[in-house]
Amino acid sequence: MSEGSPTSLLHLSITRWIADNFYLCEGCTVPRWLLYEMYIENCSPGAKDQVNSATFGKLIRLVFPGLGTRRLGTRGSARYHYDGIAIKKNSSFYARYCFLLSEKKYLRHRSPGEMMAASSWQLSTPTGTGGDACSSADAAGYKSNGQEIGTVVRMEELDKVEDCIVSFWKSLQPEKIAFMSLPDVCELFKCYDRQLFQEMENILLRDFLEEVSVQYLKSIRLFSKNVKLWLLNALEELPVLLQTTKCKEVTLFIKRLRRKTDLSNMAKTMRIVLNNNSKVTGLRSDLHAVINQGFVDMPGNLFQKMFRSPDELQNNTEIKCLNDLISLLAPSTDIRVLLNCMSSNLQAFVIEPSRNKEEFRKLAADFQLRWNFLLTAVSKAMTLNYADSFGSWHLFNLLLLDYVAHIFQSYIEEEGAESFYVTEQNDPPLLLVYEPSYLWGYFAEEQPQAKAPQPALITLMQSPSNVRLSDTYSEF
């Protein structure tokens, strides 16, 4: 067979196809018949220049010298597999491969090792090569449905979202449902969902500092809850994995909107204070008094250990953040100026110094715990000194507590981290969640002799942020 002959060129194109779609992967196996079937499907219909399975096997070993085979499956139904290769996640045949593996006629031939390897593969996001990897009509239809929902929300026809959701899921045939329930496909669809919910969130409430009515905030919060109900009802009889994946993303969507609507309510109330000259002047004066004159008494042994002198306390990061805010307090101060200042400090003191996700979680938890203690200590000092501006401070305090929690949680969500606030029972908290309420956890570690927290102590240690302005709106 001379170089450049039709046979040589055919073999070259086949080896390129193999190398483009498969790679060496220890511990993974590919059914021999399945790989050959995919090659046949790739050929033009009725093509006469196809090689037989034996020749194809030789070409496989040209690409992967020394590739072994294993006989896998139960007695009477075992089949040969190529041992040590896997399909590439950016292969245009990836979706077809997953579908064939999901067919019942093949599942009984599939080894535990293959199932574990298949579940570990992940598709890229829709903006990357993963979009080609799942280019079937099913995935295209799924994405198109998401775009339709986004369009309906943009047109402010929220009552039509239910129809979009229900009509799509109820129209699916069993084979399409089986495809969409594959772990790898669920991962891809999770990326679509995340993009859709972020788009919906931006349409409904991009900026919580926008001037919107309380009634509007109630409506979008109710809508987010309805989306979850509509989705769960539509998925009621579908596979559990599909339900779980979809539910997880819509739950995050609800939580993000809840944070923003809470903050919007508090910002709306705080603006009333900032627009009152006498209230702003009084608040600034009282805060200067309790901080600069030493009235702030930090609770717990934690601060006694960390700060052994007044100078050391004044150099504390949290004190600097609070002092920066106080310096900006003036009649008619724009609330955006205050929150932008806080955001810049969080960026400088916590986010930028973090070299990785774990370090960020620890720095954020450390800052947030101290920040909550500091604001609680200021509230105590304002109360004991009968400060006239205590009501104004209480509003500001709530806003600052929740804003810090929102910034940290939003940053983690953007990084794609999951279960970021789950800790072991005896570990110090890695990060306080949006409604910080377990400061007891740190004290339980400091006082191991206490076998269980006493209810009265828990009540005293609860963060003031548990008291919500939005509590006045019971339907929230």
Image (cartoon, helix red, strand yellow):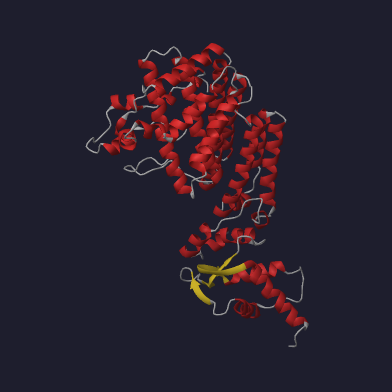
Q: Is residue 289 left or right of residue 473?
A: left
In the displayed structure, would residue 276 be above or below residue 186? above
Image quadrant where residue 18 sits: bottom right
In-front residue for pair 92/96: 92
Q: Residue furthest bottom?
A: 1
x, y percentage for residue 191? 60, 47
Quadrant showing the N terminus: bottom right
Residue 200 drawn at (x, y percent): 64, 35
| Viewer-closest of 297 and 354 | 297
Label count reads: 0
Residue 255 percent location from the top left of the image: 52, 33
Front-most of 428 and 114?
Answer: 428
Pick whichever, 277 or 37, lies toward us: 277
Residue at coordinates 65% horizontally, 55% vertically from top-left? 134
Work out whether 303 lies above or below 127.
Answer: above
Visible residue check, residue 248: no
Q: Using the image, determine if residue 403 lies above or below residue 68.
A: above
Q: What residue appears at the point 54 percent right and 77 percent down from the top-left corner?
A: 67
Residue 213, above or below 202? above
Q: Residue shown at 60%/18% (left/top)?
A: 332
Residue 394 horizontal side relative to residue 238, left or right:
left
Image spot of residue 158 (x, y percent): 66, 29
Identify the residue at the far left of this view. Answer: 449
| Res. 378 in view | yes
Q: Residue furthest front?
A: 311
